[in-house]
Image (spheres, rainbow, N blue to C red):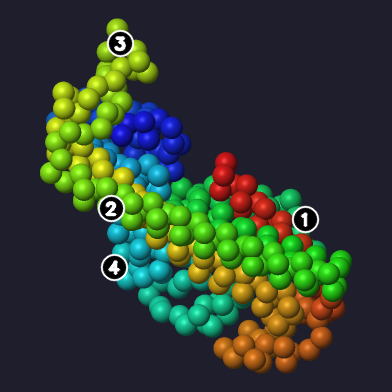
Amino acid sequence: MHRLYVEQAPHDTTLYNILQVPPNATSDKIARSYRVLSRKFHPDKVEDGEERLQQIREAYEVLKNDATRLPYHQYGLMEVSDAAFLLTGVTHHKRLNSYEIQLLSLMGYVPGQTLSREKRILYLAANIVERIRPLVEDVVSPSMILDVIAQECAILKKLPLGSNILRCIGRAYRHAGQSVLRQQRFKKMGEISNYLRENVHHTKHFLEAATIQGKLLLKEKMQSKADGVVNLPKIECHFEDDNLNDSSLYCYNDDFINQDEHQKAQAAILESLQVAALWKVRKIYLDRTIRDACMAVLNGNYFFFPSHQTDNMNGWADGGDGWVTSKGRTITTSVGRIRAASALMMIGNTMVQCSKA
């Protein structure tokens, strides 16, 4: 189990930093650090140590066992149930900070409201227009806008599932921009090529979802078969001893770990797979929704100020010819469309790169 923490980079290191341990620390090391810090920051010894001690206790509650540590390590989740609330936009039970609201907004969710898909696309399109407006109207240098986007992403990617969500949205922006620019270059061939690319793109997402669902079902089946079995497979063990080489030590569960501990480890992996399966399925829906909103903008349906006053998508194109700037100047639809596609590609690339950094 410990190998997972060694091989995978953590989604967030905040709790590890609070306990002053590396992300690949063993359970024993985390427990020792907790005891040392609890004594060090005890309110009787340190003035105003109550708040720091509370942080230490909360961090330890998450990191002390694999069932809560693994989802935090992989996705930044304090509670596994938060994944479902976040990916479906149902957040009535939770008080959100400004960054969490911003991430939900990028996904097309409004805290406290349930939007239909049509209204969600409208909401996303309005946000996208304002996001790319400075680039389309050429009032701010691209480097300045992209710096702002990068700073936002650096904060948002630390939120639970933040890097996954930003990467999905960034790819949707980029894909929508590329498809429009490709069509401009190759009218007929571009339409055929774009159709094929769309199908490949959707197929890839469905295959990813099917693969992770298969892994989940297999793991659940293995877990049910393992219940009651005493002979457990060999696993790697790590010891806190300067005279021993971790990489060369192996042991058998029968000698060093009881069945209950093994089952807890398997349950932790199973929960992590459930989060991964949920994300793969929701990613398909998020990708389609974001790209539909992008195409509503890029097709010229949302270049006009009158559309801001209506919820009826059929009336979006009734405003006139061209993108009306904030100063009243009109940019023709063809020029505005190319600028908007280029802006989405730049912003999308920045979001993808920042989510991986």
Marks 2 and 1 in Cβ contact (< 8 Å): no
Helix, strand or loop for disc 4: loop
Q: Amino acid at mark 1?
A: Ser
Chain-order first, disc 4 or disc 2: 4
Classify 287 as above or below 261: below
Residue bearing the label numbered 4: 93
**Residue 182 in picture, x, y percent from top left:** 80, 65
Residue bearing the label numbered 2: 220
Q: Amino acid at mark 3?
A: Leu
Chain-order first, disc 2 or disc 1: 1
Left or right placement of residue 279 versus residue 332 in this view:
left
Name which residue lies at 40% across and 48% down.
Answer: 75
Name which residue lies at 35% across and 15% down.
Answer: 248
**Residue 269 in picture, x, y percent from top left:** 31, 45
For label 4, the crowd category at 10 Å Cα-Cα, with few meaning under 14, some 14 to 19 and many 20 or more, is few
Left or right placement of residue 269 versus residue 38 in this view:
right
> Is residue 242 in view from this perspective?
yes
- Tell me the tag on residue 141: 1
